[in-house]
Amino acid sequence: MGLDISKIDAVVFDLGGVIIDLYEDRTYQAFAALAEMPLDEMKRLASEEEFFHLYEKGEIDDPTFRAHLRELMEFKGVEELIDEAWNAMLGPIPKERLELLEQIRGSHKLFVMSNTNEIHVKRFLRIADHVSPHKSFYEYFDKIYLSNEVGERKPNPGAWQVILDEQPIEANRILFIDDKLENIKAAESLGLQVFHNASPNDWMKLFS
């Protein structure tokens, strides 16, 4: 049975790959260049490191995260290059996505639940301000839940539970949109309606 938007009261959006274009390989490529090592080796090393998840949960601060990256890449250059490499994955926010959010805000509560971190948030908000200079990104939503602020990251159930505990909306009246299947399956197990956003603009067709 297909998704019935008329039975949805609230929509929870992921950010990367849904609201903002995301190119994770660009960051791996930038790291590999700083580390002067093959891309596959950089990806392997990064996949074994827990500090990325700790940073997303706000359990380590920016300087500690950068220190871990320096050690991983054996990099001794300036921190601006580390931040640029880390932010390389963040693409643009097409204006039409924000325009659609503005439209559906009248009929639905809108939220964000994103795995993110302080360095990305600062850059992300700069990108959003460029696209929407007269309206803060936060004003497009009823509330934004960020993993580094709530201390939980998807696909851990606690990432959605903080929303369910705070918002007086039944789980089956909430639609969760994400580009990663593991997050979709976790949200569905909590009773939320779900939509797997395989391509960045797919979710927009739900409201056309």
Image (cartoon, rainbow, N blue to C red):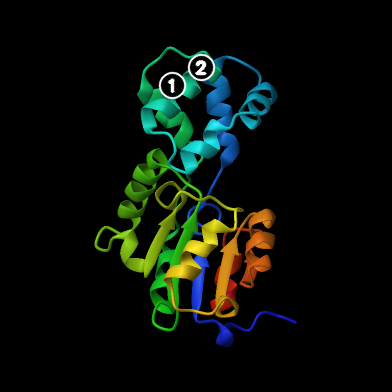
Q: Hey, what amino acid is under mark 1?
A: Ala
Q: Which quarter of the rendering shows the N terminus?
A: bottom right
Q: Counting other residues with Cα less than 10 Å from the Cα at mark 1, is it few (<14), some (14-19), or many (20 or more)?
A: some
Quarter-of-image position of residue 143: bottom left
Q: Position of residue 7 (x, y in %)?
A: 58, 86
Q: Is residue 125 above or below residue 38?
A: below
Quarter-of-image position of residue 135: bottom left
Query: Which residue is nearer to you in this view: 37 or 110?
Result: 110
Q: Is residue 3 left or right of residue 11?
A: right
The residue under the point 49% across, 23% down is: 69
Q: Are marks 2 and 1 in contact (CB under 8 Å)?
A: yes
The residue under the point 64% across, 24% down is: 45
Q: Position of residue 178 (x, y in %)?
A: 59, 60
How many labels were placed on the picture? Answer: 2
The residue beneath circle 1 is 67
Q: Residue furthest right?
A: 1
Q: Secondary structure at mark 2?
A: helix
Q: Is residue 120 left or right of residue 201?
A: left
